[in-house]
Amino acid sequence: MSNGLWLVGVGVMGREYAKVLKALNTNFRALGRGEVSADAFEAICGVNVLRGGMSYVISSSEQPPENAIVAVSSEHLYVTVKELLQYGVKNILVEKPAAFHRRQLAELSELSKANSANVMVAYNRRFYASVRELKKMAEEEGITSFHFEFTELSHVIEKLDRPREVFDSWFIGNSTHVIDLAFWLGGKPKEMSCYTGGAVGWHPASAIFTGAGTTEHGCLFAYNSNWDAPGRWSVEVLTQQRRYYLKPLETLQVQDRGSMNVSPIEIDDVLDRQFKPGLYLQTKAFLSAEWRQLLSIEEHSRNADVYEAMEKGYSYHAG
C-alpha cells in the first residue's frame, strides 16, 4: 500500500473509510472541520482529527500527501478536490458525485490532467460481491439487454435537513449510483431517447424518468424511475440463457431459460457484511492504483452528458 494518506471528512462516510483503512493496516491522517463530527470520529474510530479545515491544514503542512480520500458533504466535494489538486496531491478518491454541475466536473477533469493526477469517483456499488459475480457471469454469457430502476424514497428525502442545492442535484448526487452501475455492466449508451414528467415538493423540476436506447456494443436497454411512487433500486441483466436480478443490489438472483423460478445465487459477501458494502475492495483498489476498476474524473465528466439527457428528458447521441 502507498504511504502518505489524508482522509478528508470525518462524518458518517469518513468513519466508514476509517474502519476500512484500519483493517487494511494503512496509516492515515484524518482532517475535519466540525467539532461535533470530529469528537464523534475520535470516540468511534480511536484516531485523532486534525481540525480547522483544509485551508488551515494545508497552510501548516510542508508537503502534500501522495493520496487523499475525500468524504466531505456532497456540497463541498468540488471545492475540496480542487484545493487538493492545486496543493499537489496526485491520487484522489472522492465520494460521488465529485461535483453537482457539468462545468465543475469538466474543470476538475482538466485540472487533474494538468497536474498529472488521478482523480477517481467512488461508485462503491461496482465493488459489491453480487455485482462482481454478475459481471463475471454476464461477460461469459454475453448480455443481450438490460433494464434498471432508480426510484428514490421521497418520503425519507423530503425530511432531510440539507441545502437546497443538494435536493436540486439529487439525480447526479444519488441516482447515478444505479445508472453508473447499469452502464458499467451493460455498456455505455450510444443512442437514447429520454422522457420526464411529474414533480415532488423537494424536486419540482421532474419526478418521473423513463427511456430506452442502445449501447456502443448494440445491446438494448430501458430504464424507469418514479420518485412519486413506491419502488426500489434494481438492475436486471438478460443473456440468451438467463435473467439476472440485482434487487436489492446487494443480492443476486437468477431465472433460467424455460423456468419461471427465480433462485438466489450464493455469493461470498463477507466483506460487504463486515464493512459498508463495496467500500473495502474499492479502497483497496484505490490504494493499489488499480485504476481500471474505478471511475476516473475524466470519464465521469463525459458521462455528465448522459445524465443531463436522462434528467431533462431529451435524446442522446454519443459523439
Image (cartoon, helix red, strand yellow):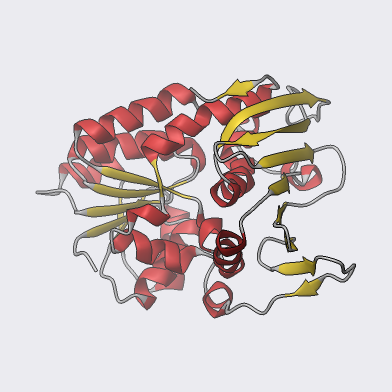
The residue drawn where x is 63% and y is 48% is 178
Instruction: Find residue 68 and report its horizontal and vertical position in percent.
Output: 29, 52
The reply, left or right, for residue 235 in relation to residue 317 is right
The reply, left or right, for residue 128 in relation to residue 83 is right
**Residue 309 seen from this side:** yes
Residue 47 in the image: above or below residue 32: below
Of residues 161 and 230, the one drawn nearer to the viewer in this rendering:
230
The reply, left or right, for residue 142 in relation to residue 258 is left
The residue drawn where x is 62% and y is 62% is 141
The residue drawn where x is 48% and y is 64% is 279
**Residue 277 seen from this side:** no
Instruction: Find residue 194 and report its horizontal and vertical position in percent.
Output: 71, 26
Instruction: Find residue 15 and report its horizontal and vertical position in percent.
Output: 46, 64
Instruction: Find residue 102 and report its horizontal and vertical position in percent.
Output: 47, 25
The reply, left or right, for residue 24 in relation to residue 279 is left
Residue 12 in the image: above or below residue 63: below
Of residues 139 and 234, the one drawn nearer to the viewer in this rendering:
139
Of residues 133 and 8, the one drawn nearer to the viewer in this rendering:
133
